[in-house]
Image (tube, rainbow, N blue to C red):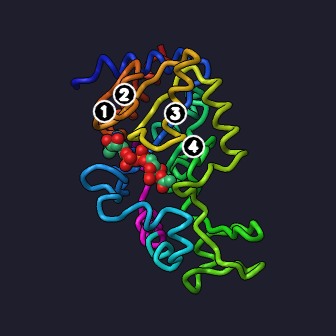
Amino acid sequence: MVYTHDVKKAAEILSGSRFAIALTGAGISADSGIPTFRGRDGLWQGYRPEDLATPEAFRRDPVKVWRWYLWRLELISSAKPNDGHKALAALEKLGVLKCVVTQNVDCLHQLAGSRCVIELHGNIRRARCDNCGYKDDVSRILGDIPPHCPRCNHIMRPDVVWFGELIPDDIWEKTVELFTRSDVVLVVGTSSTVMPAAMLPVMSKEKGARIIEVNVESSALTYITDIFIRGRASVVLPAILREVENMIRR
Ligand code: OAD
């Protein structure tokens, strides 16, 4: 394997870490059959974010936005965690990884068994009412499109963070605390082009953390990484896990 040396090095850094965390993006779910956003086959090739993933788009045409989210939800609902998600869950079980902060809305980390998961951009399986704060599974409130809140009858929206919106305060505070505390950040499958997620590893780096990146191509963040492993998350992460397990057994 071309990257054996880097995999070993990454495993060494993770095994010796005090507080390692992971930041994941759409790339980790690519091998579960969920398209990424950017790149040749990315979702934003066929759709414009401003038509579908902004509060203005929702105000303009809630039916169109809901249809797009329901199409993605269908795709996500049939997807299963891949070996990359499972490796991160196993690293947490070993006590090596403390938490996964994800930009994904697909729930695949939780389904793989990760317990500490912070969803920066919300969860596509949930809907929420911005009028009274009611939240529920999309499957439970869906009748008409757009669905209406069973409590106050206001129109409900997907419980995700759109462009131009802020990450909820409680989630952001927890995230900043994790990235400030971490001594190792494992960045997986993100182009690192969307703020504020993209600045999180930079924040850790400035505090002395080491950055390991796994991606099929270099990203906007690769320049700050200590180790960059080019490859699919579903292949590289299990390889790192195996090395960590060997190191722990020794
Ligand atoms: P992107 O689509 O921008 O980037 C996906 C990254 O995954 C790219 O860097 C790819 O090279 C990499 N990649 C693809 N397949 C991979 C694989 N099998 N293994 C490892 N890496 C792989 O997705 P994100 O960075 O997650 O936000 O995008 C961030 C945010 O932009 C999303 O959360 C979403 C989007 O617009 C909102 O909707 C608010």
* Residue contact between numbered discs 1 and 4, judged by CB atoms under 8 Å: no
For image coordinates 49% across by 18% down, the residue present is: 210
217 vs 109, left or right, is left
For image coordinates 54% across by 71% down, the residue present is: 58
Query: Label 2, label 4: how many angstroms apart (C-alpha)?
Result: 25 Å
Query: Label 1, label 3: how many angstroms apart (C-alpha)?
Result: 16 Å
Mark 1 or mark 3: which comes first in sequence?
Answer: 3
Camera-nearest label, 3 or 2: 3
Pointer 2: what residue? 222
> Over which residues does the magenta segment extend?
69-84
Q: Check mark 4 vs ligand 1: CB closer than 8 Å? yes or no.
A: no
Viewer can see residue 82 = no
154 vs 242, left or right, is right
* Residue contact between numbered discs 2 and 4, judged by CB atoms under 8 Å: no
Residue 218's disc number: 1
Mark 2 or mark 4: which comes first in sequence?
Answer: 4
For image coordinates 77% across by 79% down, the residue present is: 152
Pointer 4: what residue? 114
Query: 237 or 73: which is nearer to us?
Result: 73
Toward which corner of the image does residue 87 lie, by quadrant?
top left
| Rendered location of residue 14, percent (x, y) | 50, 21
Mark 3 or mark 4: which comes first in sequence?
Answer: 4
Question: Does the magenta stretch mainly form a helix, a strand or a loop?
Answer: helix
Pointer 3: what residue? 199
